[in-house]
Image: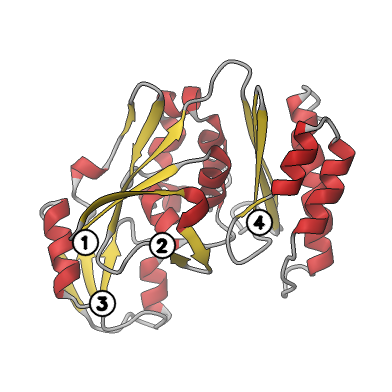
């Protein structure tokens, strides 16, 4: 099946892209890496939209050290994140997540902003952003605003972005002394979406645990985090399994996903203790 015909415009700047979205009157779609949007077009899940191509806006790409935070442009490709020494040093969770994302061709084209704005609940980067406590920076006709990751993901493929706004950058706290960041997932084959996945961020005074592929959005496991902070790992596993309500589908039952979530938490905790068996 081929994509249905629609309008196309290449943005010359971020402001120009916003103007194009405003002119589309709710029918604009941002084209970045195209790894999710083009597939949706080919399946006729999206049609007759104005495609606003931002792929050549160099100001939206790159990784930079901003003092207390790491800032990553929305057009930074997955492969660039995997290669970045800044990311490896200050946000190793993202570096590790890259190796789980699909295949090399997609990692070379897909962008972190596209992954976050697409909001696939089975994708790695949205859960990473949630676990890291990232802030997502967007721009629209009314100016710029910052949205906490906790408030950004609203439902399946749905975010807090307005129809005429663009995600331009994310910022996140830098990994400090004593911090640890790990990701674990289970998939049927390498490159497949995870049946269940878990991101664990340990800081000197707190834990953050985010899960993916277990709900309509990435999930921040609050009760699990509280148990970990109380020094009760077994209680954290039980709390985690109790606070999620995974879907059943052709790939896995809800109960199996709930079981996997507990296994992944135990694996992540074992890695923090240096046991990778």
- Image quarter where the C terminus lies is top right
Cα–Cα gap, marks 4 and 1: 29 Å
Q: Which residue is mark 4?
A: 194
C-alpha gap between disc 2 and disc 4: 24 Å
Left or right: 224 in relation to 15: right
| Residue under the image location 13 percent in, 64 percent down | 19
Q: Earlier in the sequence, mark 3 or mark 2?
A: 3
Q: Which label belongs to residue 53? A: 1
What distance separates the C-alpha of mark 3 from that of mark 2? 15 Å
Frontmost residue, 223 versus 213 = 223
Q: Find residue 142 and report its image quarter.
A: bottom left
SS class of the residue under badge 2? loop
- Tag 2 or tag 1, which sits nearer the N-term? 1
Q: Which residue is mark 2?
A: 160
Q: CA distance from mark 3 to mark 1?
A: 16 Å
x, y percentage for residue 93? 56, 35
- Quarter of the image for residue 24 reads bottom left
Q: Are marks 3 and 1 in contact (CB under 8 Å)?
A: no
Neighbourhood count class around disc 2 (C-alpha, 10 Å): few under 14, some 14–19, many 20 upward: some
Q: Residue at x 53, y 24 (%)?
A: 175
In the rendered image of this protein, does residue 189 appear above or below residue 182? below
Q: Please indicate whether residue 11 sits to the left or right of residue 35 in the image.
A: left
- Which of disc 4 and disc 2 is earlier in sequence? 2
Q: CA distance from mark 3 to mark 4?
A: 32 Å
Mark carried by residue 26: 3
């Amino acid at each position: 099946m081929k994509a249905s015909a629609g309008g196309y415009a290449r943005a010359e700047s971020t402001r120009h892209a916003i103007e194009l979205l405003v002119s589309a009157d709710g029918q604009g779609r941002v084209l970045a890496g195209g790894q999710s949007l083009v597939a949706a077009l080919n399946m006729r899940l999206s049609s007759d939209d104005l495609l606003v191509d931002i792929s050549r806006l160099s100001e939206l790409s790159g990784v930079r050290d901003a003092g207390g935070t790491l800032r990553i442009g929305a057009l930074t490709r997955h492969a660039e994140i995997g290669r970045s020494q800044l990311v490896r040093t200050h946000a190793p969770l993202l570096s590790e997540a890259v190796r789980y994302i699909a295949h090399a061709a997609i990692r070379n084209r897909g962008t972190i902003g596209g992954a976050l704005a697409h909001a696939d609940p089975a994708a790695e980067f949205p859960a990473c952003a949630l676990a890291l406590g990232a802030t997502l920076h967007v721009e629209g006709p009314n100016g710029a605003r910052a949205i906490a990751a906790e408030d950004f993901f609203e439902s399946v493929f749905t975010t807090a972005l307005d129809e005429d706004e663009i995600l331009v950058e994310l910022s996140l706290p830098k990994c400090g002394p004593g911090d640890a960041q790990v990701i674990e997932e289970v998939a049927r084959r390498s490159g497949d979406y995870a049946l269940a996945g878990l991101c664990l961020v340990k800081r000197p005074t707190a834990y953050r645990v985010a899960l993916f592929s277990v709900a309509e959005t990435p999930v921040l496991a609050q009760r699990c985090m509280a148990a970990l902070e109380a020094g009760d790992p077994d209680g954290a596993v039980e709390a985690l399994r109790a606070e999620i309500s995974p879907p059943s589908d052709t790939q896995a039952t809800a109960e199996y996903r709930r079981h996997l979530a507990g296994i992944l938490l135990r694996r992540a905790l074992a890695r923090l203790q240096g046991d990778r068996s």
